Image: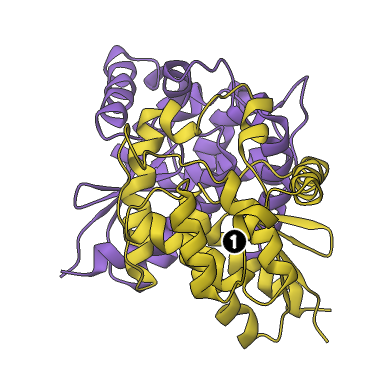
Chain colours: A yellow, B purple
Amino acid sequence: MTHPIEFWFEFGSTYSYLTAMRIEDAAGARGVDVRWRPFLLGPVFAAQGWDTSPFNIYKAKGEYMWRDMARRAERFGLPFKRLPETGPGAFPQNGLAAARIALVGLDEAWGKAFTRAVYSAEFAEGHDIGEPALLQRLAETAGAQGDVLGRAQTQAIKDRLKENVDEAFRLGIFGAPSFIVKGDLFWGDDRLEDALDAAASK
Amino acid sequence: MTHPIEFWFEFGSTYSYLTAMRIEDAAGARGVDVRWRPFLLGPVFAAQGWDTSPFNIYKAKGEYMWRDMARRAERFGLPFKRLPETGPGAFPQNGLAAARIALVGLDEAWGKAFTRAVYSAEFAEGHDIGEPALLQRLAETAGAQGDVLGRAQTQAIKDRLKENVDEAFRLGIFGAPSFIVKGDLFWGDDRLEDALDAAASK
């Protein structure tokens, strides 16, 4: 008898990539069910007075993040590329389209595979995940059928993503990845094990 | 054959408390020598445009920090009190006097014990570490002799603390605790094990 873990992620977030690639194995080993919750950090950052990632605003912290990410990715055996500061594919990338498609996919069977594929395209390959053709291809490879981009543009999907953002605010979420276990917030890929321990305890 | 680890700490920093209490045991188990480096976060935060701790400026992040600290302290078996937002002993406390005394003590034999005692007084007991009488008593208990407060007010000690702050900037340090191993920066108590692994490898 374990509790579920909610995994809140933003497609532009470097550390969310690490979690997306490893959470199912880590949770499965403890018998914990994972609920994938895409959201957007843009509105969260805007509420803190930022118009971009704090890693771009605070240079020393940003330099460190790229160094730390390279070490953490190596630790988990994941390929990782530092994104450029300007131009196509610059950090932080816009995860809006990917998040809407992920919501469609998580209602079906291909959402998790699609999410992992998007993160790999972004942080292992350096692709721009705002590209519709890329997203369509990744969704099809993950098992989606039909006009995925169109289905991701319905008002119902747009509203659900907005509701996720509102819920993130209510939960006190201020960064990604974040985890909710029994109403308790954990922040950062480096708290995944603590969150899973909490989920696996009574 | 291991490499030394530099432990950069600020007395007002909650997470530095966790590291101060556990680093010597963790490093000793790996045969790693620890170099204790007190510094001040005030100038570092000021350079980022902040006039107090970011945990006070960004409320959601601050709320989370106190929750996370309580969990991490419990994990390490350390007592922990949330500090008040205003009044005596409010967070963040001013660590200037303690840092200067620590520099005196680290030249002698009592600097580490004094540092641990200051952190305990602050975060386990909730005392105001700006109080000269408290600092004098903690230094004596740690083994100091004579007029510790006077010796901590010499120009040489003031200059050394300033030099530590300058060096922290040069090293790219933007928060505390931070660790330097072979020139590489690690940030946060939750990176202590990674930093020690790096120190213990060739």
The C terminus of chain A sits in image quarter: bottom right
Q: Residue at x 70, y 33 (%)?
A: B127
**Residue B146 visible in the current orientation:** no
Quarter holding residue A57: top left
**Residue B186 visible in the current orientation:** yes
* A28, above or below A130, in the image: below
For disc 1, the chain is A
Q: Which residue is mark 1?
A: A191
**Which one is nearer the viewer's eye here, B108 or B40?**
B40
Quarter holding residue A148: bottom right
Residue B180 shown left or right of residue A152 in the figure: left
- Quick one: label 1, few (<14), some, or many (20+) residues within 10 Å? some
The amino acid pointed to by label 1 is Arg
Quarter holding residue A103: bottom right
* A119, above or below A58, in the image: below
* A98, above or below A86, in the image: below
| Residue found at the very far front of the displayed protein | A146
The N terminus of chain A sits in image quarter: bottom right
| Residue found at the very far top of the displayed protein | B155
Q: Position of residue B128 (x, y in %)?
A: 67, 28
What is the number of callouts on the image?
A: 1
Q: Residue at x 35, y 35 (%)?
A: B173
Q: Residue at x 74, y 43 (%)?
A: A165
Q: Residue at x 62, y 45 (%)?
A: B120
Q: Position of residue A102 (x, y in %)?
A: 63, 60
Q: Position of residue B135 (x, y in %)?
A: 56, 30
Residue A45 shown left or right of residue A190 in the figure: right
Q: Position of residue A106 (x, y in %)?
A: 70, 68
